[in-house]
Amino acid sequence: METYILAHDLGTTNHKCTLYRQDGGIVASNSCSYPTFYHHGGIAEQDPKHWWQNVVKTTKEVLTSISPCNIAVITFSGHMNGCLPVDKEGTPLYMSIIHADSRSKQFEKEIFNKVDEDQLYKFTGNRIDPHYTLMKMYWLKKREPEKYKKSAFFLQAKDYLAYKMTGTLGVTDYSDASLNGAFHLLNKKWEDSIFMELALDRSKMPDIVPSTQVIGHVSHTAALETGLTEGTPVVIGGGDGACATMGAGCINEGDMYINLGTTAWVSKVTDVPYIDPYKRVFNLCDLNPNYYNVLGTMKTAGAAYEWAIKQFSTISDWSTMEVSLEFEQFEEQIQHVPAGSRGVVFHPYLLGERSPLWNDSIRGSFLGLSLYHNRFDLVKAVLEGVSFSLASIAEILNADKLAKEVKIIGGGAKSKALTGILCDVMQLPVQLNHNLSDATSLGAAIAGGVGIGMFQSFEEAGQLVKRGKRLEPEKEFADLYQRRMELFKMLYERIKDINIVI
C-alpha cells in the first residue's frame, strides 16, 4: 500500500495543504487565504483561529483524493519571526504579531542601551530589529503586561498548528528558534544572558527540537475536525526559510538559491554560522542539524517588477484578463533592450532596503534618463536593479567560496526576462525548480519523511526535488554588468543620505 506525506505550509497570505508521494510527486493540493490586519504604527496581525480553520478546510479537501489511513506523516512549515502568546491551555491571549509588524521599533533605542548589539549578533547571527520575535516579546511586556504575565509560551505559527493537531504545547524547532533573536547558534539553545538583560522570562520560551522530531500524533479532537486518522505521526517541520532551502534542492554545504517572490532572498548552506563584521546578512538553522543557512533579503523584487509594469502599462483596469497579455508583451519587448538598459540605472528601494544596506529611509530612483529612453528601457532597468541587489547579497555569501550554481524558486522565476538577467549579472548557471512555488511545502515534506524513517537521510530525500530548466550565463555581458554593478553601488553611496519628505 502506497503511503503519503501531508504537508501544511502557512504562508503570509495563503495556506497550502499538499499531499506528496514518496517520489515527490503531488497527489493533491488545496489552498485558501486568510487576512492580515494592518493598522497605524507598524501593526501587522493575524488571527490564529483563521490558521486552524484553513488547516481543517484544506485537509478535508485533500482527503477526497485518498484514504486518510494512507498518510504516513503530517508536517508543517510556517512564516517566521512571529509572536503568539498562549496560556498554559494553549489558548491565544492576543492576536499573532507577525514578521511584518514593526510596532516594537519604539523600544529600539531602549533595547540598544541594554544589549550589546555586537555581542548579540555574535551569539545569534542576527541584528536587533523590530521584525524579530525578541522585540515583539519586549513590546508585549511593556504595552500588554497582563497578557505577558499570563503567557505560558510565545509560539511561532507552525508550532501553534502542531499543538492544535497533537495537543503537544510549547515545542518549536531549531530553524524557527534561530530567528527569535535570543538563540545561541553554536550552542543551539536559548541565550540566557539576553533574557536577563531585557528582563524577559526565559521560562516562557518553548522547548527546541530538531525539525524532523515526531512531537506527537493526531489527537482524537483533531481527527474529528480534519478527517485524519487518530494516531498519525506529526513531525514539527520548520520555518519557511529553512524549508524553502531544502525544497530548493540545497542539500549540501555550499549550495545556494534565490527565492524570487514579491520580496526575495539569497541563501547559502554553511557548516558554521557566517558572522559578518558589518552585520549585512543573517543566519538560521537548516533543517539538517549539521548545517546553517546564511541569508540576505531584499524588500521589493517581484513587487518592483509588478509596480513598473503597472506604471508603464496601457491597461487601466488591472482586474481583467488582459493583465497576463500585458506581462507577456513586456517580457517580449525587454528582450530587445540591450544589456545595461541604454544607460538607465534603477535602485529598487521602493520600501527601503534590508540586506546588505539595512536602510529603511532610502527610496527607489531612476538615474540617467534622457529623451530617447522608452518604457521598456525603464522596465529592463528595474529588473537589472533587482538583479544587482540580489548579486550584492550573493557576493557576501560567496566571499570565501564561490557557489557552482544558483537555484531559483518562487513565483518571480516565471519571468524569463528576470531569470535571464539575473543569470548574466551573477555570471553563474541558474537552475530552476520544476515546481517553482512548492519548494517550501516540499522542504516540510522532506523533514516529515526523514522524521519517520521513510528516508534514511536528507541526501536520500533530495530525490524528491525535481529540476526544471537550466540557464547558462552569457559571458559577453560579464564585463558590462560588472561595471554597471559598481556604478549601481557608487550611486547609492551618493544618494543614501538624501531624505525625501512627502
Image: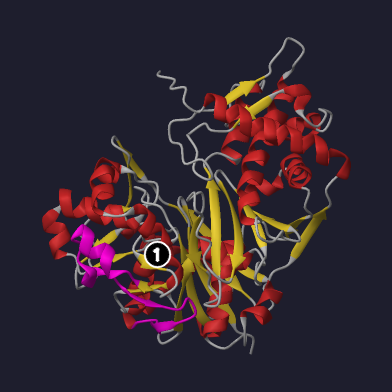
The residues colored magenta run 190-219
Residue 491 lies, in percent from the top left, at 61, 27
Circle 1 is placed at which residue position? Answer: 123
- Vertical position of residue 287 compared to residue 337: above or below: below
Residue 158 percent location from the top left of the image: 41, 66
Q: Is 323 situated left or right of 500 in this image?
A: right
Is residue 275 part of the magenta span, yes or no? Answer: no
Q: Circle 1 — which element?
A: helix
Q: Nearer the viewer, residue 270 or 466?
A: 270
Q: Nearer the viewer, residue 474 or 397?
A: 397
Q: Residue at x 62, y 88 (%)?
A: 456
Q: Which part of the image, by quadrant, shows the N terminus?
A: bottom right
The one nearer the camera, 302 or 127, is 127
Instruction: Give how far across and how far down residue 259 sits, in percent.
Output: 61, 53
Residue furthest to the top:
371
Residue 410 shows up from this direction: no
Q: Which image quadrant for residue 303?
A: top right
Instruction: Decide if residue 279 is on the left or right side of residue 414.
Output: left
* Residue 300, placed above or below residue 180: above
Three-letter code for the amino acid on which mark 1 is drawn: Phe
**114 lies above or below 478:** below
Picture residue at 37% right of the left edge, 48% below the top = 129
